[in-house]
Amino acid sequence: MSTPGLPRRAALLGGLGCALTACSASHPVARNFSSPSPSPTGSAFPAPSAWQPGPGELQPDVKLRAVQVVEAIGSWPPGGQGAAAAGQRVAALGLPAELAAQGGTLLADAPQAAVEVVYAQYGGLLSESASVLVVCRQWLAGPDGAPQSAGTTVDVRLSRADPRWNVTALHPADPGPAAATLPDPATRVLAQPRIVLPPAAVADLRSGQVHDSALNAMLTLAGPYSFQVSVVRSGHPLLVFGTDRPSDHPLGKAFDTWQIDGHPVVDPATPTDLVDSFMRAAAAAGSYNVGGPRLLAGGRTANQFFSDPTHHDHVHAGFTA
């Protein structure tokens, strides 16, 4: 999420992210998303554990509500494909069955599927409404039953209700088609093992719609750090949540980082100096707008660094061009 300054974002509340596979008190280190996770059950088809909030969450049930809808739509046993069956799974959560029709690529025509939530990050949280960006990978059974890896990011919108928030809409990522040729920075980022990108972010880079300023900053940061990106361009609200201002993300001028050197930004056990140094390094790499869990002093401009509850769980880096 981008912002020209903290005062205009102070109304936003946020949450925090989680780890791969089974999010709990333990957070796994980075791994390459190009190959499927091993099935925890030892079966041929992956069976990832349901996502659960990890330590440090500010609004854990809001994120959990959003994640559960994505898991219900994008995971099914053999023969459970189709919007109607997905609608039944959503209805079992106490939510409108018609939400399933908004699942986008999660509703692929495959006889079996499984979703693993990589990360759940706030796109924004107001007193009565929220956006949760559910970053996930999905396995779809091919003609021979073997799992084929896919994935997306879904911007899940919610409204306050008692006892649990309601899900009102889903906006899956739409990265666009792959470009015929890519600029050198995009090719280098895709090949850099110290930068881990989820499926939608990979598609963003392959579309050729991410600015060189953001890509070159990633490459610079990959010198001293290894890190996992949550969101680049697609799957993010078009506007800064709760405002009429365009976000830098859909313009290809921002990226969010949820894990640094194997440590989730949100985890209370993560060293504060690690996150703070990453934020300062992002500013030194050209970001005019660096957000994170703490407000840092010493920026080139008054608003170069910002902090609010939304950014309790990740580091945002925005760029002007």
Image (tube, helix red, strand yellow):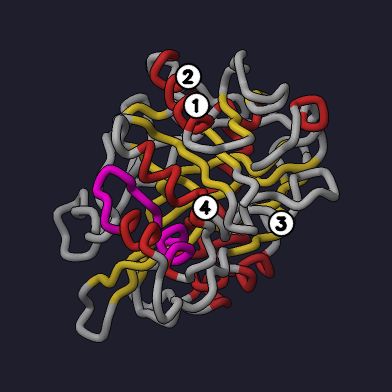
Q: Nearer the N terminus, badge 1 or badge 3?
A: 3
Q: Mark 1, residues whose alpha carbon is within 10 Å: few (<14), some, or many (≥20)?
A: many
Q: Mark 2, residues whose alpha carbon is within 10 Å: few (<14), some, or many (≥20)?
A: some
Q: Nearer the N terminus, badge 4 or badge 3?
A: 4
From the viewer's perspective, is residue 302 above or below residue 208? above
Q: Which residue is mark 1?
A: 279
Q: Amino acid at mark 2?
A: Asp
Who's the residue at 53% across and 30% down the image? 283
Dots 1, 3 in contact, CB < 8 A = no
Q: Amino acid at mark 1?
A: Met
Dots 1, 4 in contact, CB < 8 A = no
Q: Amino acid at mark 4?
A: Val
Q: Among all residues in the image, which is located at the extreme front?
A: 300
Q: Which residue is mark 4?
A: 232
Q: Which residues are magenta?
A: 191-205
Who's the residue at 34% across and 42% down the image? 20
Q: Which residue is mark 3?
A: 238
Query: Which of these two is toward me, 52 or 8?
Result: 8
Q: Position of residue 218 (x, y in %)?
A: 41, 44
Who's the residue at 29% across and 75% down the image? 141
Decide if residue 293 is on the left or right side of residue 168.
left
Who's the residue at 21% across and 49% down the image? 40
Q: Which residue is mark 2?
A: 276
The label shown at residue 246 is: none
**Element on which disc 1 rests:** helix
Q: Among all residues in the image, which is located at the extreme bottom?
A: 143
Decide if residue 131 is on the left or right side of residue 134.
right
